[in-house]
Amino acid sequence: MGKRLEGSRSKPLLVGDPEGLPAFLVGYLDRLTERNYSPWTVDRIRTHLRDFILWCEEQGVTRPSGVDRPLLEAYQRHLFFYRKKNGKPLCVAHHHLRITAIRLWLSWMVKQGRLLTNSAADLELPRKEKRLPKAILSEPEVERLLAVPDVRTSMGLRDRAILETFYSTGMRRAELAGLRVGHVDADRGTVMVRQGKGRKDRVVPIGDRALLWIARYRDEARPELVVGGWDEGVLFLNPMGEPLDLGDLTALVADYVKRSGLGKEGSCHLLRHTMATLMLENGADTRIIQEILGHASLETTQIYTHLSILSVKKVHAATHPGKPAPRAVPR
């Protein structure tokens, strides 16, 4: 009886053949775990490689020796023509993630002596698009969004504190979900982000208003959410006294954006993008934004310079030879 390789988003694989692809996937994931990759990263890689293995089985390939260049190019074509449940194709970034996962897995198998060469090493990938976020909020729009939660209720108070924290710190969804009460330092005006992307810790500033809402939630609403006196210290809790699920957090913020009546779509990352863009427009240095957001590369942060249109408009108004519009349009 073979071992079943479980995962969160695809059907399980049966690990029966010790020389089969599923067996090497198990070994590779164990190695990633030993190297301290985050559970989220390991799960994502597991999903991508499991999908590839299942596709290989449909082509009659069950062992590493069958993963050659023609097979990989056929898989690329499969990804290109693949359509999700909503009828949309995979984005280029998702395509890259899947092929990169395969490339690194095959490289590991070469090092293990299971393959002579990595057939994916020089596989050509589609060019990535440089796309801007779909929406950014102005300062008045943010204030309108923040005012939506009903702070007369425990859930509304919690949700206002969540929105304020996202807007003030620009942290990622998983980072906010993992916040603990002790990570907030009101005296210094900072928040400790533990095990952010890349498993890196960082300290980020947080504004006084966000701190006030966090303190009010912590003192007035959070005690009602702690079930049976068992408190693990996670800051934001659901009605069952448990840490917030990432999907629920996305749905929560998206619902408030919709209820705000702004006519824009977005969720947690909308506030992250907005925070970075508004700070740049108010004169913040790009490297400071990089530090706050936890970007490994300045290139990632520089996308916000394309969103910071106010400074561009000022230069345009000051240097463009066109004359200003008259106060009254002549008849």
Image (cartoon, helix red, strand yellow):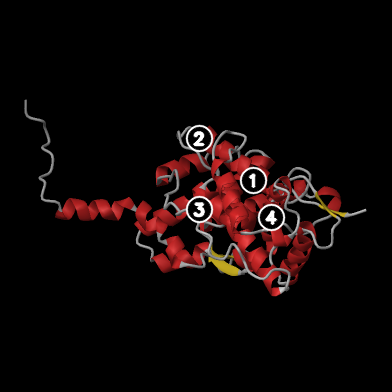
Residue pointed to by mark 4: 49
Badge 3 amino acid: Arg
Find the distance from the CA under tag 4 to the CA under tag 3: 30 Å
- Is disc 4 in contact with disc 2, using a CB cutoff of under 8 Å? no
The image position of residue 294, as x and y in percent, is 53, 65
Residue pointed to by mark 2: 260
**Looking at the image, can residue 194 be seen?**
no
* Crowd tier of the residue under label 1, counting other residues whose Cα lies within 10 Å: few below 14, some 14–19, many 20 or above: many
Camera-side residue of 19 and 143:
19
* Crowd tier of the residue under label 2, counting other residues whose Cα lies within 10 Å: few below 14, some 14–19, many 20 or above: some
- Of pointers 3 and 2, the one earlier in the residue sequence: 2
- Of pointers 4 and 2, the one earlier in the residue sequence: 4
Q: What label sits on residue 272 in the rendered view? A: 3
Nearer to us: label 4 or label 3: 4
Residue pointed to by mark 1: 249
Badge 2 amino acid: Ser
- Is disc 1 in contact with disc 4, using a CB cutoff of under 8 Å? no
Kindly state the secondary structure of the residue where label 2 is placed. loop
Nearer to us: label 3 or label 2: 3
Residue 197 position (above or below residue 13): below
Q: Residue at 62% of width from left, 40% of height from top?
A: 251
